[in-house]
Amino acid sequence: MTHRNIWLDCDPGHDDATAILLAVHTPGVSLLGISTVHGNASAENTNNNAARCLYAFAAPEDIKIYPGSTKPLIRPTRHDPEIHGIDGLGGVEGLPPGTYKPVQERLKHPGRVPKAIDAIARAVEQTWKDGAGDKVTIISSGPMTNIALFVSVYPELLGGIEEFVFMGGGVGIGNRSASAEFNILCDPEAAQIVLDVPVKKTMIPLNVTHTAIVTLETLRKLLSSDAPYSPGVAPVKASTNLRHMLWTLIWYFAESYKSTFGFMHGPPLHDALTIAYVSNPELFKCKRYRVDVELSGTHTAGETVVDIWNYRSCDDSWGRDGKNCMVAESLDVSGFFQLFLDCVSRCDAVSPLNQ
């Protein structure tokens, strides 16, 4: 198994919480740190929520939270309380609040709190060591404002980046406008800046994340790893506090997706797929394309324009003039949920929620 050093930039958010779970408990993945950004909720809430998750998932104590951008580069800030509740983790039971002292420890730093882009830079410097060490994969599961600022302020560190992996966009579909996906729509200019960087990028679009549906059978296995599946029988009670918390997290998300989008069979775990791709790329089929973001369309601002017919003449680079992005096109759904449930089991054995 390939070992990957990762940095996670996120806006928790129910599905971001599952991405954090996988980042902490997936074999072959070393989480260096987490930065937070505006998006599903305010930057203050996403920061607190990330710390709450690190505590609940028993992440190593040296993994800290670093606050990032509170607003997009240019556009007005937008959040998504319809899907995630006002604080970003609506409906969750058993997750300590941001004021809980062990949660606060994840937010504390000696001296002044380093900002997201500086923390990312430091992690890359210390890991890459100017080529003597290992590269870092930067994962984004929210708007890419922090990532755009990092690549703009620290271009000398791009050699230390193995890959940028982001959940966002769609090929011909949107979810927060007729044509745009939420993470990209929040800050389209930031997404275009990242897409122009001459480093490999992989996009996990809605077309794929909408296949990663948490069915009742998966929920049953989440509640209790030993529970047999019986069609039509109500889910069993959670066997641990951690599993109950995760069940309430996903159940709220399921109800939001049912009422807003008409997803009747369960919600998609969008953001967790970024970690699954980094750790188990064989679960995905991807193809390289030219991808750009529509920045000025009256009806299409924030749309990811994927050149599937190769209209644009491109070079071999990953940058401004090249086929700049790998785009995931399909997922081994059962393999992904096995990975997810295995991580839940590993977390179950160490989570302080179960003490």
Image (cartoon, rainbow, N blue to C red):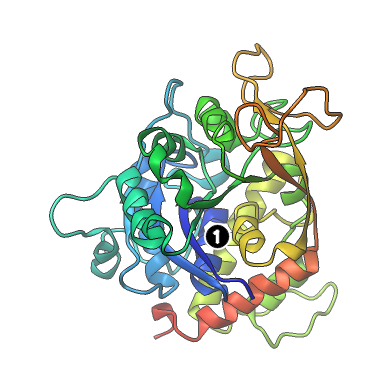
Q: Is 64 rendered above or below residue 239?
A: above
Instruction: Give the residue at x 31% y 70%.
Output: 62
Q: Position of residue 278 (x, y in %)?
A: 62, 61
Compare residues 288 and 102 and report the one nearer the observer.
288
Which residue is denoted by mark 1 in the rendering?
19
Taking depth in this image into account, of 37 and 41 the one nearest to the observer is 37
Q: Residue 320 at what x, y percent from top left?
A: 60, 27
Badge 1: residue crowd in 10 Å (few <14, some 14–19, many ≥20): many
Residue that appears at 78% across and 29% down = 307
Q: Residue furthest left?
A: 111
| Quadrant of the rendered image containing residue 147 | top left
Q: Label 1's element?
A: helix
26 relative position to 308: left or right: left
Residue at 71% across / 36% down in the picture?
316
Examine the rendering and report whether any part of residue 42 can be seen.
no
Residue 354 in view here: yes
Out of 173 and 167, give the one closest to the viewer: 167
Measuring from the top left, give residue 241's x and y in whole percent. Answer: 49, 78
* Left or right: 111 as drawn, with respect to 205: left
Q: Position of residue 101 (x, y in %)?
A: 23, 67
Q: How many marks?
A: 1
Instruction: Residue at 28%, 45% (x, y): give it.
Output: 115
Quarter in which the N terminus is drawn: bottom right
Eyeballing the image, is 217 above or below 7?
Answer: below
